[in-house]
Structures are given as structure tokens and as C-alpha cells.
Image (cartoon, grey):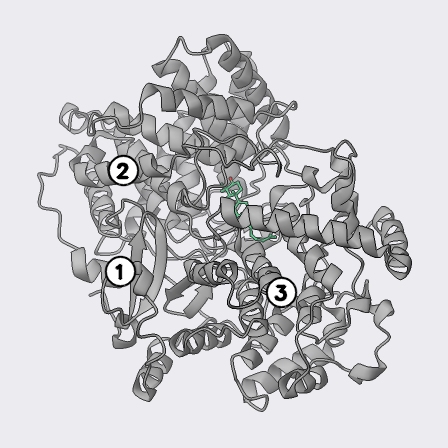
Amino acid sequence: MLNVKPGWKNWQLLTEKGRQIWAFKPGSNNINEHLQNADSITDEDIAQFAEDFQFDKSGNPNSGDKVFRNQAAEAKFQQFTGQIPQSKNPDEQKVIDALIKGMNYYACLQCEDGHWPGDYGGPLFLLPGLLIAAYISDTPFPKAHREMMKLYLFNHQNKDGGWGMHIEGESTMFGTVMQYVSLRLLGVDKDDQRLTKARTWIKTNGGATGIPSWGKFYLAVLNLYDWQGFNSLFPEMWLFPKWLPVHPWRYWCHTRMVYLPMAYCYAQRIKAPENELILSLREEIYSEDFASIDWPKQRNAVCEKDCYTTPSPVLKWMNFFTNNYEKFRCAWLRKKATDYILKYLNAEDEQTSYINIGPVNQAINSICIWHAYGKDSTQFKKHAARWYDYLWVAEDGMKMNGYNGSQLWDTAFASRAMLESGLGKLFPETVAKSYRFIELAQIKAEHPTHAEFFRHPMIGSWPFSTPENGWPVADCTAEGLSAALAIHHSGLVEPAIDEQRIKQAVDVILSYQNTDGGWATYELTRASKWLEKLNPSEVFADIMIDYSWTECTAACVISLLEIQDTYPDYKSGEIRKAISAGINFILEQQKPDGSWYGGWAVCFTYATWFGVEAISKAKGKGYYDDAVLMTSINKACAFLVDNQKADGGWGETFESCSKLVYTEAATSQVINTAWALLTLMAADFGDKKIMEAGIKVLLNRQTDTGDWPQENISGVFNYNCMITYANYRNIFPIWALSRYCNRYIKDKKINAV
Ligand code: LAN
């Protein structure tokens, strides 16, 4: 029933303490030896890959993570053999059966270390960065990997010959040129028909001079674009006094950590040596003769298909000054700035065990470290070893994940989803294993250099992925804490996270609250919104500072409410104030139609779930005027009821995120349906028929084994780039069914499990 193609079997996922590495024909489970056979791939293997990793993007560009899932299921799937609680009502029985089936299947995907791995691809501008780092440093990936990457890139080519910024997106110059160059670096011949088609797309859309600035950067590093055509990154800004409102320590950490190594490359004008390939590429990607291009004129040239944000007049002015400064720059100051940047890069590398905060700075830091210390340096080798932490194999080939995984996040959600009803206790080992991972992932120490490099204090926090990545996130801390509490309450484990560690987590959450009452992502909001006027990326919005978000705020408020229940004496006054201010922030974010905009998943159904969950939990406890809370909840429910589809489900497309208006998908989506159901149930919505219709969609879509289909992409960042959350298709239907059992099936036997 669960097909595992022979070519898929060559790839095994090795995991250790959350670390995920795909190995080609591994000889053992030793994660450090995963490359042993990767270069000894045969022609037959390659032919088998070509056959088994064929993927038709026109049906659904989202792969279903079948390489991992089907192999895990083949090895571990067993029908549930425990006793299934019985209800007298046949409709209720169907829900109970589906929930148990859903948890039973999902349990077999859990790793030994307790986390749930999964595809975290989606963006198409990540793998090119890594390939450029590999190329310039002359550290090629093994053949097995290269073949799989080629397949992935070709599998995601759009019909018009181009590529989007993400797998569901329409072709853009950024997507197309980056994938084109990547395929050429991987050795594909320029006369390959698919590349000829891509070239036509590039040229008819004005050529690579119109690539957005991040693309200009990568091309410049490859010596395919002149650095003169790139707005100055003014490395000296790192020497500004810290009190200045524009000092980069105030930027959103992702923006800071990407522009940091970019500034190093810019200061050094790093460029690959000219060779046959580079000279040929110069002819392939431009509409005009490379030598005749007026580079300074290209600095702000962006293909209209790529434009998402337009540069502000303030940015243009700033560019005018910083570009002119380049002509007279002081060598001594430049060196001082570059030395500082390098020191900072080394600190980030050490603080994250060379994983780095994300996929973009992993690639660019690698380039800087190679440039500074050489290919044989220990630092560079440590970097290159971590490239593999970001690679993922699915039936569409080998991709680069958007992070080193979503380990803690998925595990925390999964535990809470299962434990919301007593039926979760039928899987005690699964819960105990998740707990071990959650325990392991809580951050226990501070880095010696954390204050020097602007890191938020983090003892007691949780990261999004693994403890080695170690960047604390406000709402991941909240989810980690909520999950730990839920597991403690279940009585299924001996608590290893003691009271002191719980309180440390609470302290971190409190320390993360912004003055607007909300919570941001990794740090406090460190500058005002006007800094956005300096956003130089034409493809992302709101990247300059860490903003308060509905979802992050709701997650933190919910965990604090739970703490109030469990540890009523701990900082009670402070926590009550924090909750009230948080609720106030959430109420302020609600749209007139009753919905909330979601910044980190698709989209209104996601944030509406968070908003309502927090508000309904806070209701009746004196944190806020209950009448106001009720009005907000009712408006949210009305919004959902209005948008329920004829089949009883809900469905949004990624355009909800980029266009900021609710955009209905052609068919209902299990994940959106689950979020809508969780919301309505949290709100105690009066008309049970609405909920029953949604539950039916979840039951009908469930597969024989207990999985759900992979439908549209469900994650997003910075409004405009989409990202895959492979685990959501299990977690949220399970959670909705759990909640339904818990709230509406009143049979004592079921609740007592
Ligand atoms: C993530 C993933 C998780 C996500 C949530 C925890 C879900 C959210 O509630 C808070 C923000 C956070 C932590 C988040 C921020 C942005 C990330 C790190 C990502 C979407 C994963 C990838 C993305 C990162 C910025 C991608 C690299 C691209 C750049 C523009 C630098």
C-alpha cells in the first residue's frame, strides 16, 4: 500500500539529538560517516534516480515527503492493537477511530530521539546559495547529492521555463537565474533543452541585470555581475555607536545575520576566478554583451515580476551617499569594520555549532570563512560539514530546507495535539519520547559572548529546531513550555524538567514582551517601524525589525495562562499584567471582518485560531472586560462561518499571505479546516453542525493508514516566501479530532482512558 521505490531506498535519514542527515547507502547508523558511499554512485543508481524521482509539479508542486514517510512506515507501521474505546453513537465512534488511526500512523514517523522529522523546503533561493559556496570554495557535493539536486531543480521548473521564488510561485528573475546558474554549476550542459527554455525566459524578461539585490549579490560573488552594480552595504555601519537608532544590532536577527556576511563579501569584493564556465554564463544570462553593461545603472534595476516592495526615497538617498563613499573610503576604517564583522561571524559560528541561524547565512558565512581562512581551515571544514544538516530528500529530489529543521516546534505541537483528549494516553511511549526531546532541546546555558553580540538572554528558552542551533524563539519557548506542562499533567512521565527550569522558561517569556503588549520572534523590537524605510530587499516586506505578531503573542499568553493555573504563586502579579497587555495587543490586531492576519502560516485561519485560542482561555478570569472578549470571539466565528466551503471545510492559498486578503483555495484544505475547527471549538461555537461538517472533511480525507494528503503549501515568511511544514497535515487534524473527542464526546469511558 505504501510504495517505496527502489531509488528511494538508497537514501536513509540518520538522526541524532534532532540532527537530520540524509545518507546515500549508509554503511552504518553513524551520522558522522554519512558520506562514506556518496561518491561511489553507479550509472545504474543514477538511472534509477531519474526514474524514481520523477515528479509532476503540474498536479501539486508540494511533495508528500514520501521518501521518509513510506520508508518509516514500511519499517515501523503496525495496526493499532490496543483497546479502542467504544461509543454508543456510531458518528462519534468514527471520530474516535479516525483519531486513533491518525495518532497510530503519526507515531511511526517519530525518530528514536523523540522528534518528528519532515520536509522543510519551499523557498527556491536557498540551495543556489549553498551551491555557490560549494563552487567558489572548490568543495563540491558528492555525486549522489549532485544528481539528486539536479532532479529537484528540474522538477520545479515552471511550464514557462522559469522558476518562482518558492515552489508554488510564478516565475521570477530571482528564481529563474538562481536555478539556471545552479544547474550549470552542477554540470548541466547549456544546450540541454530545459536550460534553453529557461534562457529564453530570462532574456524575454530583460536578462539577469534585473535580478533583485540578493541575486545581484550571489552573481557578483560568482563573478557574473560587477560589484559596481550593487548598492554599497556600507560595512562601516557596524562601527556606529550602539545608541544610534540605525545601528544594525537593532535589526531583526535574520536580516542582521544575512547582511553581516554580505557586508564582508562586499568589503572584500569576493569573486570567483574567471574560467570557461563563468565566461560562458556571462553570455548566457544577459540580454546584452557583458562587457558593455553600464553597471552602476543596474543597482536599482529589478524585473517587474520580482518587485514586492519598492525602495523608499530614504533608502535611495542613503544609497547615494554610501555609493559615493566607496570612491573615497578610508582603508583603515574599512579594515576595522571588516575585522569586526569577521569576529562577529566567528561568534555566530561558534554559538550555533556552525549551523548558523538559518540557511542563508549558513551559505554566505561559509563563503566568508573560506575567504578568510581557506578551504583547509578547521573553521571552514566545520561549516561544510553542516551543509548536510540543511539538505532534505523527498520524492521531488534533494532540496535545501528553510532551517536545520522544525524539530522542537513540531514535537511540541504534536504532543499537545495528542494529549488534548484522554485518547493520547493510548500512546505512552510516543509521548515519553517526545518529552525526552523537549527536555533535551531546552536551552540550559548562555554563550560566553552572548551580550557582546546582542543575543537575548536565553537560559530556559526553546529554539525552533535543535539545541545546537540554539537561537531562542519567543513562541517556541511558549510552545515548549505548554507541551512540557501538558505532558507533566498527563502523568505519563517522571518530570525531568524541574520547577526551576519551568520558571526559567516563564522568565524568558516575560523578558520577551514588547512595550506594545505583544511578542515578536527571536528578540525584542529594538527600533521603530520607520527603519523599514531602509529595507533594501525588493522581495520581502517587514524584515528590518522584529515585530510583535498575533501568533507569537497568543502562544506566549496561552503558556502564561497555563502557568497561572499550575504555579499560581509564581510572579502572579507580573504575569497577570503581561497577559492583559498581550490580550490587548491581540484585540488590536483583529481585522474589522473578525479575522487575524497570519505572518507565519497560511494565513487568516492560522492566526484566527491563535487569537481566539488565547482570548477564550483568558475569558472569565478577570484579565479583560469579558464583554469585549465575547464580541471579538463572536466576530471571529462569524468570519469563519462565512468562509466555510460547501463541503464543510476551509481552504486558503498562499496569496492570502502576499496579498493580505483572504484568498480562497479551489478545494478545502485539511490544515485550514483543522485550524478553523480548533477555533470554533475553542470558542464553544453554538452551532455544532458547522463543526460536524468540518470534521467530516477530515475523516473523508484520511488515508487508509491514518495519514492525510499533502495539499497546498502552508508556511510563510516575510509575506512573500512560502515554506513547507510537512508535519502540519498530521498534527492539526489530530489536534482537531482530539479536541472534538474531548469536548463533545461525553462518554466517561473515553475521557477516562
Ligand atoms: C521561521 C520558522 C518558525 C517561525 C515561527 C516559530 C513559526 C514563528 O511563529 C516565528 C518566526 C519563525 C521562528 C521563523 C522566522 C523566519 C524563518 C527563520 C522561518 C520562517 C524559517 C525560515 C525563515 C528564515 C528567515 C529563512 C531565510 C530567509 C531569509 C529572508 C533570511
Q: CA distance from mark 2 to mark 1?
A: 21 Å
Q: CA distance from mark 1 to mark 3?
A: 31 Å
Residue that mark 1 sits on: 30
Quick check: can you spot residue 100? yes
| Mark 3: amino acid | His
The answer to whether the residue labelled 1 contacts the one labelled 3, judged by CB atoms less than 8 Å apart, is no
| Mark 2: amino acid | Arg
Quarter holding the N terminus is: bottom left
Q: Nearer the viewer, residue 626 or 132?
A: 132
Mark toward the viewer: 1 or 3: 3
Task: Pick whichever of labels 2 and 3 is earlier in the sequence.
Answer: 3
Q: Determine whether 287 is above or below 699 in the image.
A: below
Residue that mark 3 sits on: 371
Question: Residue 713: x and y, percent?
Answer: 48, 55
Q: What residue is drawn where x is 51% and y is 33%?
A: 474
Q: What residue is drawn where x is 78% and y is 82%?
A: 290
Quick check: can you spot residue 601? no
Q: Determine whether 401 is above or below 500 in the image.
A: below
Element type where label 1 sits in the image: loop
| Mark 1: amino acid | Asn
Task: Pick whichever of labels 1 and 3 is earlier in the sequence.
Answer: 1
Residue that mark 2 sits on: 436
Q: Determine whether 719 is above or below 272 in the image.
A: above
Question: Residue 729: x and y, percent?
Answer: 37, 50
Q: Residues within 10 Å of mark 2 (few under 14, many from 20)?
A: many
